[in-house]
Structures are given as C-alpha cells and as structure tokens.
Image (cartoon, grey):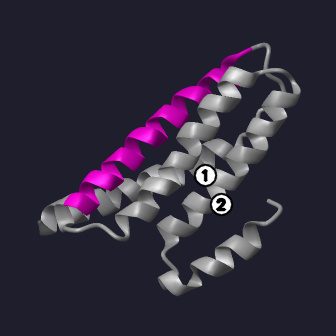
Amino acid sequence: MRKCANTLMKLEYRKENIILKISVEFALVIIDYSEQLKVHKHYEIASQLIRSGTSIGANIWEAQSSESRKDFGHKLKIADKEAKEVEYWLLLCKSSEHIKNYDEELDGKLLSIQKLLSRIISTNKSRG
C-alpha cells in the first residue's frame, strides 16, 4: 500500500470516518492486485476490478456531500451494489485455475466494507 498512508492522512478532516478510510484502503489494494493481474495478462478482469473496486469508495465519498438523507442512502446503495460486483470478480479470480496468487485478505476487507455499508444503510433507513 504505497501512498495509502498519505492519502489516509488527508481523510482526517473527515473526522475519522471509518467507511471512507477502509474504502480508500480497499481501492488502493484493488489497484495493486489489478496491476498483478495485468502482469499475468488478465486484462479484462483487472479492468473490471479497478472500475468496481474504486467505485465503492467514490460513491461513499460522494455520499458525504449528499443533498438529503434519501440521496445519502441512494449513493450508499450504489456503493453496496459495486461491492457485490467486486465480490463476483474476486470469486472468479479465486476459482480460476488460470489465476495464481489470490490474496485472501481481499475477501476480508471487502466483507468489512459490506457489513459497514449494510449497517449504515439500515440505520439511515430507520431514521428516515
């Protein structure tokens, strides 16, 4: 996680928003993993993972400036859908006999994001 520490320091002004922090960390790990996939010529899966894996954090980031509680929930639901897509691509990577060196930590990091998103969406819905 090369520049992750510097990037995460910039998030401090967001008052230690844990979902932002872990989604940025996850995006950086996905970028690194996608680069490894490209080295082994798995370009399409790498491309899909970068798009969906970084989209999670982008939607969470955008939700922080939402115009309403409903808009906030909608953006987080999009992030949750992107997390489901990442889950699919990671399942393919893990299950494929052509892809070596799958990092099991990706599953744990993604699960943490999904659980947090689920709690935040549920809380937002109950307040709404």
| 72 in magenta | yes
- 88 or 38: nearer the eye? 38
The residue at the far top in this view is 97
Near-viewer residue (85 or 7): 7
Mark closer to the observer (2, 1): 2
In the displayed structure, does residue 21 sit left or right of residue 34?
A: left
Whether 114 is among the magenta residues is no
Q: Are marks 2 and 1 in contact (CB under 8 Å)?
A: yes
- For the C terminus, the quadrant is bottom left
x then y, percent, for residue 33: 76, 40
Where is residue 93? Give x, y as percent.
69, 25
Q: Is residue 84 above or below residue 21?
A: above
The residue stretch that appears in magenta: 71-96
Direction from residue 16 to residue 26 in the image, left or right: right
Q: Is residue 28 visible?
A: yes
At label 1, counting other C-alpha atoms closer than 10 Å, the crowd grade (few under 14, some 14-19, many 20 or more) is some
* Crowd band around label 2 with a 10 angstrom C-alpha radius: few (<14), some (14–19), many (20+): many
At 60% across and 61% down in the image, what residue appears?
24
Amino acid type at circle 2 is Glu
Q: Quadrant of residue 5?
A: bottom right
Position above or below: 57 against 6: above
Residue at far right of view: 39
Residue 30 horizontal side relative to residue 118, left or right: right
The tag on residue 20 is none
Q: Quadrant of the N terminus?
A: bottom right
Tag 1, which secondary structure?
Answer: helix
Q: Position of residue 84 (x, y in %)?
A: 45, 36
Check disc 1 and report the residue beneath it.
109
| Mark 2 vs 1, N-terminal side | 2
Give the residue number, with chain letter if any, for mark 2: 25
SS of the residue under disc 2: helix
